[in-house]
Image (tube, rainbow, N blue to C red):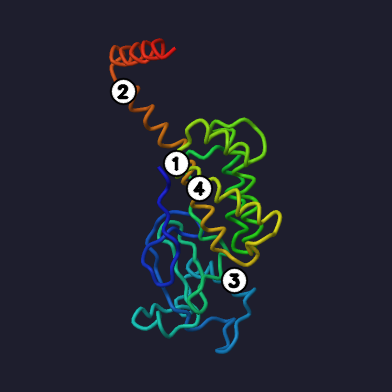
Amino acid sequence: MENKYTQPEYGENKFNCPNCGAFSHQQWSEILHYPFYDGGSIDIKSYLREVPQMYELEEEEAISSSINNFLTNNYVAISVCYQCRNASIWIDGKMVYPLLSSAPLPNQDMPKDVKELYEEARRVSALSPRASTAMLRLALEKLLPQIGAEKGNIDNMIGQLVRKGLPKEVEKALDNLRVIGNEAVHPGTIDIKDNANFASALFRLLNFVVDRMITQLKEIDEIYELLPEGKRKGIEQRNTGFTSKQG
């Protein structure tokens, strides 16, 4: 089934770590003093380079847990993943390091070539929703032949699957991916450039299609194989007889 993904949120105790991807507890701290912080501005390049090592150096004077008021009064905070012990940096309640997408992780059954594009789209989505959306369109183009379509343009491949009995909800998901993805490649009536909501929705849709057309079918086949061989042969004979009568 689709991997459960909990988006990193400021002040939350648990979410999927933007560094290692694991769903993990987070230790929150407020930055009260650091060599690059002068009380008014931050040398952000130096800050981002040095802060992830703060816990390894154990410089307790550099940070101080201040749970009582840090959610409302701090300017800079860090969350440290209990799983990998790496830090994420937050300024004014927004994560600025690492600069990763909040998109869900790919379905574990996603084909390898599709997953590679999906992961690349995740990496660039925070910087360019349009580039991310274009990559997801290409991922869709590679996925369709692997769920029953003959290679061709995306619209024709979806049409082939519809004629084969594609569930209506999957058809809608595929057309959403197709139309929005096309707008990223050939700009028209939908403004993708600065709209991360479109890209985020497409990640979920692609995962949904993989779950519905690959994962769920695989699980049904695995359960079917648990039936006694005699029962399975009886089902096959029934279906063969029914097909013969229909002919």
Q: Nearer the viewer, residue 246 or 212?
A: 246
Question: Where does label 2 land, which residue?
Answer: 226
The answer to whether the residues at label 3 and label 4 have Cβ atoms under 8 Å apart is: no
The answer to whether the residues at label 3 and label 2 have Cβ atoms under 8 Å apart is: no
The amino acid beneath tag 3 is Leu
The answer to whether the residues at label 1 and label 2 have Cβ atoms under 8 Å apart is: no
Residue 189, position in %: x, y? 65, 62
The amino acid beneath tag 4 is Ala
Q: CA distance from mark 3 to mark 1?
A: 37 Å
Q: Dot 2: within a 10 Å radius of its alpha carbon, few (fewer than 14), some, or many (20 or more) residues?
A: few
Q: Residue furthest right?
A: 186
- The residue positioned 48% from the left and 38% from the top of the image is 109
Labelled disc at residue 173: 4
Establish if 47 lies above or below 175: below
The answer to whether the residues at label 4 and label 2 have Cβ atoms under 8 Å apart is: no
Q: CA distance from mark 1 to mark 2?
A: 21 Å
Looking at the rendered image, the disc whose residue lies closer to the viewer, 1 or 2, is 1
Indicate which disc, 3 or 1, sits on the residue closer to the N terminus.
3
Q: Which quadrant of the rendered structure holds the N terminus?
A: top left
Q: Which quadrant of the rendered structure holds the C terminus?
A: top left
Secondary element under disc 3, as helix, strand or loop, is helix
Indicate which disc, 4 or 2, sits on the residue closer to the N terminus.
4
Question: Where does label 1 land, which residue?
Answer: 211
Indicate which disc, 3 or 4, sits on the residue closer to the N terminus.
3
The reply, left or right, for residue 112 in relation to residue 73 is right
Looking at the rendered image, the disc whose residue lies closer to the viewer, 1 or 4, is 4
Question: Where does label 3 land, which residue?
Answer: 48
The reply, left or right, for residue 190 in relation to residue 1 is right
Q: CA distance from mark 1 to mark 4?
A: 12 Å
Q: Dot 1: within a 10 Å radius of its alpha carbon, few (fewer than 14), some, or many (20 or more) residues?
A: many
